[in-house]
Amino acid sequence: MGAIVQMLNAAILITVLACGALLLYPKLANAPMWRATITPLASIIGSGFLVLGPILGVSFGLYAPLVMLTLVVIAYGFGSTIRYNIGRIDAVAHRPAVVERIEPFASMVLAFAYIISVAYYLNLFGAFGVSLTPFDDPYYAKLLTTAVFLLILIVGWTKGFAALERMEQISVGVKLAIIGGLLCGLAIHFGDTAQNGALTFNAANVTGWSAVTLIFGLIVTVQGFETSRYLGRHYDAKTRIRSMRLAQILSTLIYMVYIVLLTYALSPGIITLDETSIIDMIAVVAPILPVLLVAAALSAQFSAAVADTSGSGGLMAEVSKNRIPPHLAYAILVGAGLFLTWTLNIFEIISYASRAFAAYYAIQAGIAATSAWLRRDMKKLMIFTPLALLGICIAVFGQPVE
């Protein structure tokens, strides 16, 4: 048995190293299309990869893959509105006056969504940071989260984020390579489980309207594609459109494979649903996976938090016409993040973040619908208007995991 475990650990490590080598391959790493794709791709499959498996498995049982498909289809729909805006609005010199009036409000909503998302990222950082230590307790996790919030504030006030942001490209590669290793381990475990006739098909614990509102509350776990819209300084509109579409397609394939392997080969019924449930679930696959997953979680959540803190500060300064300078914006973000950390649990924060991003997507869909109406593009108008209404519904009715 020990030899089998060692072979499985070796297979996972080899996969991680192979994926890492592929991501570092100069022709791929330096290709403009891949560089434009990696930012939204890493954001989409970041935090969601850590929490979605257990949440969907416990809540929806054998229907978890169908719910995952629903989430990525909704995200793709919202992505289509942003791609339309990039192509029809961002790529032209003179935007319609109505868009000029709405866009600052959209930026303000996005800045607010970033504030909540940073709390989401750093609370996951805290939970995973203590998960394999003797201090595996919500109180110590919140203390670690608080310490990282204060570190980000101090660095943002004194040095700026340049030094921390340099970690982002490295952390993205580490995260994607470890995800490759995780999928390898799950695939091997799935094959063994299927061969032994031990696949699990659990009933759903959440149904009806509660299931719908829970799905609404999970939109943030597939969020991140909108970052392509704000890469205009580096890539033209055509590249951003194609790279966002590619990122959403790749993330959909990764998520669907992950959820299918996890749902039917690992039973979530024996675990307590919390931020780090995925560690307990995958520990039965291979001993090396929890350590790798914690490493990926810490790297990914820290870099994502830094990126969104910087983005929120820039958006606040832009929308307020520098009446709120980035330094003050960082302080506002950290203050709000600490309040959320000590008053809400991670699932409530996920729900609020989902609702905030849904509000932003509703506005983007509204902008796209307005542009389509001005262009007399009725086909696009009939697509974007329901998406705007769906975004509003998600923002109003999204609920956290109980």
Image (tube, rainbow, N blue to C red):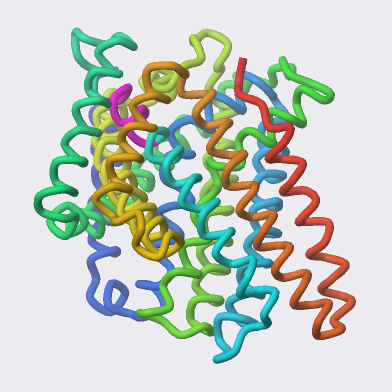
Q: Quadrant of the C terminus?
A: top right
Residue 109 in picture, x, y percent from top left: 55, 51
> Residue drawn 82% across and 25% down?
209
> Residue drawn 70% across and 74% down?
98
Residue 3 at least partly seen: no
The number of numbered discs placed on residues in the rendered structure image is 0
Given residues 28 and 307, the one toward you in this image is: 307
Q: Main secondary structure of the magenta part?
A: helix
Above or below — where is 391 with respect to 267? below
Question: In which image quadrant can residue 56 be found?
Answer: top right
| 53 is within the stretch colored magenta | no
Given residues 247 and 265, the one toward you in this image is: 247
Q: Is residue 391 left or right of residue 83?
A: right
> Residue drawn 32% across and 44% down?
305
| 125 is within the stretch colored magenta | yes
Q: Is residue 281 left or right of residue 130?
A: right
> Residue drawn 51% across and 53% down?
110
Residue 162 in picture, x, y percent from top left: 16, 60
Q: In this view, does 67 lie to the left or right of 317?
A: right
Question: In which image quadrant can residue 310 be found?
Answer: bottom left
Q: In which quarter of the image is the N terminus?
A: top left
Given residues 44 and 100, the one toward you in this image is: 100
Above or below — where is 150 with respect to 277? below
Q: In the image as oriented, which residue stretches furthest toward the front? A: 323
Residue 59 in picture, x, y percent from top left: 66, 21
Residue 302 in picture, x, y percent from top left: 27, 41
Above or below — where is 272 with respect to 330? above
Please state the extent of the stretch shown in magenta in the rendering: 121-128
Residue 272 at least partly seen: yes
